[in-house]
Amino acid sequence: MDTPAAPEPAPRARARRGRSATLTALLAAAVVGTLGTAPAAPADTTRPTVATCPADLAAKANCYTGRDANGAYYTMAVPKRWSGSLVVHAHGGPDFSYDESTTTEDLERWAVMVDEGYAWVGSSYRRGGYGVRMAAADTENVRRLFVDRFGRPDRTYLHGQSWGGNVAAKVAETHGTKPGAYDGVLLTNGFLAGGSRGYDTRVDLRTVYQYYCRNLPRPTEPQYPLWQGLPANSTLTPDDVHDRLQECTGIDSERADRTARQQRNLDDILAVTRIPEHSLATNMQYAAFLLQDIVRKRLDGRNPFSNRGVRYEGSRDDRALNAGVARFTADPTARRDLSYDSDLTGRIALPVLTLHAIDDPQVFVEHQAAYGAAVQAADRGEHLVQTYTRESDHSTLSKAEYANSLAALDTWARTGRKPTPASIARTCGAFDTAHGGGCFYDPRFRPAPFATKVRPRPGGLHWPAMTAAQERAWSRIDGVGIAP
């Protein structure tokens, strides 16, 4: 769910070029697995290989790369003036394939953490496609690799960005109680509602889009259930899907160049799904290809999604929409497996600090409301501080805010004194002087409930989506979850 920033092109080219990074990331790789969970395997004892650091860190750190026993690529950076503490990074996505450049590019994006004196390590994950527990196990594995090579750090902090926030939060719940493993968690623009509810936005987009556009599939093409995203044998590319979106809504065109029908379709789709226009194209790619990956490659064709009982509102004719939109009900075992893999119980035992852009167009800020409700329901509120900024980007926030957040988390972990959103906002200025990027905190902001942004399914108003008791019970079922 992470799309790198690009130089600002001309208006017409902006939509095409802006989506190119997303489309490249969404090209699916054929990955087949059997159902199961992903325990943390013993760390590969092969020593990391010395590598060239990104240019901004070349004079400041020593870098290393390698591949762990499960096939996941990793990158490590140790500052020449190391503070003794480590950041273990969980990247966003999920993308559908990775290579050795994945983690080095992540290091370059979050070089400010190394600038602040932290060692840094990140895993590419062993395969592309969906799998939160798999990615969590690979994140834990790369921490062990670092310890094998450099010894136990003074403090170790998890950082998860976007979908990596889901991964890091899962690491905190599954490995965070082990003595000496982790000391705190930083979640930035984190996808924290979990898979069983967090993807309902894309499910709704997939069905509402087809009601208005009727071109994915076309009437002349083989029909299939929309909860699949795309059928397993689909030959459509991301460009093909985008071209159909353009055909129906004129998303790439200036408003004056759209037909009246395109504008009506676009207005209705945006109003009903509550997705911003500038992120509709990216969300449409996930609605097609990510749902396909989850259903076909991870759940053996079973449907984990439902829209029974959902009333869609905001269109020119809600009665016709609700009468005509496709309806479907989840397979209980598929929903259980997706929930077990990705949902969060809220049972945290470490200091967890979140940072989220209020106008994040990809991972709505209401994900924070879902996570806060889950943590409170688990009676772990003393371990959570949530902060918000007046920013509108998803993939990258201010360097000053990343550095400030890490410093606040480090102080909390070392002293036991829990910060407040206001106290964190007050300390940002010094980091802005050092790193730039600005400070945009709004200490008074509180997100609305998740259900105000993502239409709840029956029973979907309570949090957590998976209780600790459910997790324990499900863990005893042979083959539960998603295969690593």
Image: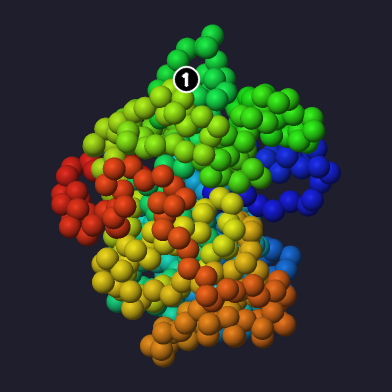
- Decide if residue 119 is on the left or right side of residue 16: left
Res 98 quadrant in image: top right
**Towards the viewer: 125 or 289:** 289
Q: For residue 33, say whether it is visible.
A: no
**Towards the viewer: 110 or 389:** 389
Q: Quadrant of the C terminus?
A: top left
Work out whether 288 lies above or below 347. above
- Decide if residue 244 is on the left or right side of residue 138: right
Q: For residue 276, say whether it is visible.
A: yes
- The colour mode here is rainbow
The single residue placed furthest to the top in the displayed view is 220
Q: Which residue is painted at 76% across and 35% down in the image?
A: 255
User: Which secondary structure lies at badge 1?
Assistant: loop
Residue 418, horizontal then vertical, whole percent: 41, 84
Q: Which residue is painted at 51% across and 54% down in the image?
A: 364
Residue 410, horizontal then vertical, whole percent: 48, 82
Res 481 quadrant in image: top left
**Mark 1 = which residue?**
233
Q: Which residue is painted at 17% across and 45% down in the image?
A: 477
Residue 290, horizontal then vertical, whole percent: 48, 37
- Decide if residue 381 is on the left or right side of residue 73: left
| Badge 1: residue crowd in 10 Å (few <14, some 14–19, many ≥20) | few
Work out whether 94 lies above or below 298. below
Q: Which residue is painted at 28% across and 37% down in the image?
A: 334
Work out whether 282 lies above or below 434. above
Q: How many marks?
A: 1
Give the amino acid type for the residue marked by disc 1 in the picture: Asn
Work out whether 425 lies above or below 299. below
**Towards the viewer: 288 or 460:** 460
Residue 443, horizontal then vertical, whole percent: 54, 76
